Image (tube, rainbow, N blue to C red):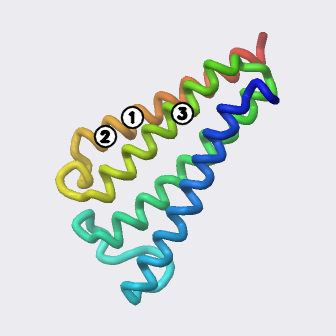
Amino acid sequence: MEAYWLSILGVLALCLLSVLLAVYSGVSKGFAGALSGPVFPADDGNRLYRIDRVHMNSVEALAPFVVPAVLAMMVGVGPVTLAVLVWAHLAIRLTHLVIYLRGGSAAKGGSVRTILYVSGALVMLALILVTGWAALH
């Protein structure tokens, strides 16, 4: 597992990001006097809603990425290949977070946010395919 230290740090960073966003969302809701759970109005113009959605987006993206990343280490995907995929995914998630929290047209589903979403999905797909290929060979 020593060869995968960079990938392990990236996966841990993704997990930490999700935890930090949970705390940020909870604290933001507390200061706003909002209850836990969904934020209303469900509108990208509502900063509290965007904070909540960024947190939920990170949670939704975590398992489909972390599971194949751990499996990739188990089946022997090249450490450099895996590290590139993990850190590319982390960079995409961080960029998505900044764009979404900033607000404006990009946060409302503009082309930048769509490109980031598709890019993240393609990185996940590449990770799944590379892991599956290594498992079969």
Disc 2 to disc 1: CB gap under 8 Å:
yes
Query: In the image as oriented, which residue stretches furthest toward the bottom?
Result: 33
Q: Residues within 10 Å of mark 2 (few under 14, many from 20)?
A: some
Residue 60 x, y percent position in the rendering: 54, 52
User: Can you tell which of label 1 and label 3 is closer to the viewer?
Assistant: 3
Instruction: Describe residue 134's horizontal placement relative to residue 121 as left or right.
Output: right
Residue occupying the point 64% across, 42% down: 11
Residue occupying the point 72% across, 32% down: 5
In the image, residue 118 sits, relative to residue 60, either above or below, namely above
User: Can you tell which of label 2 and label 3 is closer to the viewer?
Assistant: 3
Residue occupying the point 37% across, 46% down: 96
Cα–Cα gap, marks 2 and 3: 19 Å
Mark 3 residue type = Trp
Q: Which residue is mark 3?
A: 87
Residue 42 occupies quadrant: bottom left
Q: Earlier in the sequence, mark 2 or mark 3?
A: 3
Q: Which mark is residue 118?
A: 1
Q: Nearer the viewer, residue 25 or 49?
A: 25
Mark 2 residue type = Thr
Q: Earlier in the sequence, mark 1 or mark 3?
A: 3
Residue 112 x, y percent position in the rendering: 26, 40
Cα–Cα gap, marks 1 and 3: 16 Å
In the image, residue 90 sits, relative to residue 97, either above or below, namely above
Query: In the image as oriented, which residue stretches furthest toward the top?
Result: 137
Q: The N terminus is located in which quarter?
A: top right
Q: How many circles with numbers are drawn on the protein?
A: 3
Q: Which mark is residue 59?
A: none
Per the image, label 1 sits on a secondary structure element best described as helix
Q: Which residue is mark 2?
A: 114
Instruction: Describe residue 112's horizontal placement relative to residue 11 as left or right.
Output: left
